[in-house]
Image (tube, coloured by chain):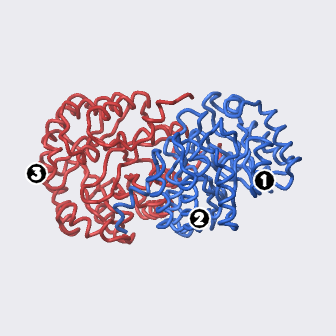
Chain colours: A red, B blue
């Protein structure tokens, strides 16, 4: 097994996005206590990087109305956790910073149509807002999430040039991490391999993270392809929670526990203890009214080896 | 996208195993009419190779009690279909041959424990039976399915040497196709890449087909890894039906429609027309009382592009 192993990274960073991308798609309000409890269980299982909430207007996403409380409690309880929050604009960025958040995700879609549906702005307007955030909250690290980087539910194919353009603007704005998002799970392994090869070649100083929805069951195959091209950072979601309110049919993310299993099998390091993480999955199953698409909770009921 | 594409085969053979591996795990008897109808729909969608039934004793698997009728009707209706049946012994092989079947699968597990549980024989006894079939029904082409080739629910790890031994015996018995089965969905991409590389090196004249259960969601990643090592033949199951009565927790196979989607996206030929194939999946959903684990039926409800 020596030969193929050499192609892959020795260690992977898993960024848990369930409390943000997952919870925001759950209709029934999840108690703040339950949110914090689930985050706590994941932290105890070894998760070291997490998107914990989203500083959006509560009218837009009522589920995230407790962003401030979640962020403050988590920061106090787990000062060493790499805590990330999503922000849609300068106001969200300021609020996040005030709560002690020091790293945020900001989303722009590579497709104009999806950007308009998702954040009610043109891409140009989104980029202006991004520059404002960088100027006015300069101590806040910003990661750029490029949504629909592999295809758009409205526009169809998304030319790679649109992705390059956003990366170019992000680099100019001093951003060091780019998240390539397959918002609707339309990417395939060759496409992933091709895009990550090209972006790494052009922007060798940037960190590229993949956020791959599992709508068509291709999530782990896409992750495997990305790892073969040296990508070592992935966003996944507890239980496979997730979707996009403005991307019809976007089923869940790759489940964190499924990626953990894959990496454990391949002896690639990641820092999460599966047995403990599954307690968090069980807690989500119990307290969150959502369909869990991950495989490991079911598989483990029969685990013999 | 030129570079990575070159690593992969241009065309893939998909062997549909739903009517055998899928149906045999369904408790409620499926009417012979319905079985034939589903096979018919798949054939119309372009499926060219199919395991249509299993010539086992009806006491062992009552669902397959209509093996003779299914085989005879399918042979008459679709003389050009590559029709395969599973047989557990010489008697099954004779019965299959009498119904016009000219190609059968015969299963031996790489792990002694699983072979005993699955077919109530030692591996040595299974090999004797295989040789008897070859001698006494010489005009019947036999493929060897090596079950638990990547791990066993009873024995745990399965040394590669046990797989090589079975291949060696199969080659001696004049068998030209070996099916490497991940019966419980425990394989990972590096393990798949490693094993298929070694077996192809040792047995360059044999055709190797993969049969990969999707218990832990790694099926398509494993298929992608196998294709990167030149494997061009895969067994999948309509709707993701499948399992193994003697392998607890063996969830479904990779769904044929999920593999079709992956190959369509990667522009790899396979001959199946997805839109028509999904009619077969819908028919299974309607007429077969089983949990479908494939992703495409759900994804297509929202399909925009």
Q: Mark 2 against mark 1, which lies toward the viewer?
A: 1
In the rendering, at what x and y percent does residue B59 appear?
Answer: 65, 35
Distance of mark 2 from mark 3, alpha carbons?
51 Å
The part of the image, by quadrant, that contains residue A170 is bottom left
Residue beneath label 1, please? B97
Tell me the residue at 52%/30% (across/down).
Answer: A303
In the rendering, at what x and y percent does residue A301 appear?
Answer: 46, 30
Circle 2 crowding by C-alpha within 10 Å: few under 14, some 14–19, many from 20: many
Can the viewer see residue A52?
yes
Q: Quadrant of the C terminus of chain A?
A: top right
Q: Mark 1 against mark 3, which lies toward the viewer?
A: 1
Q: Chain of mark 2?
A: B
Report the label total: 3
In this rendered view, identify the residue nearer to me: A63 or A299.
A299
| Residue B43 numbered tag | 2
Distance of mark 2 from mark 1, alpha carbons?
22 Å
- Left or right of B183? Residue A292 is left
Dot 1 lies on which element?
A: helix
Residue beneath label 3, please? A59
């Amino acid at each position: 097994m020596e030969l193929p192993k050499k192609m892959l990274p020795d260690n992977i960073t898993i960024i848990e996005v369930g409390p943000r991308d997952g919870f925001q798609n759950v209709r029934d309000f999840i108690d703040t206590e339950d949110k914090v409890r689930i985050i706590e269980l994941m932290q105890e299982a070894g998760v070291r990087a997490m998107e914990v909430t989203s500083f959006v207007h509560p009218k837009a996403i009522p589920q995230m109305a407790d962003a401030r409380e979640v962020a403050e409690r988590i920061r106090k309880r787990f000062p060493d956790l790499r805590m990330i929050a999503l922000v849609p604009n300068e106001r969200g960025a300021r609020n996040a910073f005030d709560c002690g958040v020091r790293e945020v995700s900001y989303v722009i879609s590579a497709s104009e149509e999806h950007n308009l549906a998702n954040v009610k702005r043109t891409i140009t307007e989104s980029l202006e807002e991004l520059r404002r955030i960088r100027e006015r909250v300069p101590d806040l690290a910003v990661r750029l999430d490029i949504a629909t980087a592999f295809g758009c539910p409205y526009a169809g194919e998304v030319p790679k040039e649109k992705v390059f353009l956003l990366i170019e603007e992000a680099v100019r704005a001093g951003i060091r991490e780019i998240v390539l998002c397959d918002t609707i799970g339309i990417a395939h392994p060759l496409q992933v391999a091709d895009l990550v090869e090209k972006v790494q070649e052009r922007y060798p100083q940037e960190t590229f993270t993949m956020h791959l929805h599992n709508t068509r069951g291709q999530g782990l195959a896409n992750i495997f392809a990305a790892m073969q091209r040296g990508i070592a950072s992935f966003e996944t979601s507890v239980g496979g929670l997730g979707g996009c309110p403005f991307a019809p049919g976007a089923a869940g993310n790759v489940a964190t526990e499924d990626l953990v299993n894959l990496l454990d099998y391949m002896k690639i390091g990641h820092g999460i203890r599966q047995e403990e993480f599954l307690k968090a999955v069980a807690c989500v199953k119990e307290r969150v009214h959502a369909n869990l698409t991950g495989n490991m909770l079911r598989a483990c009921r029969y685990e013999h080896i």
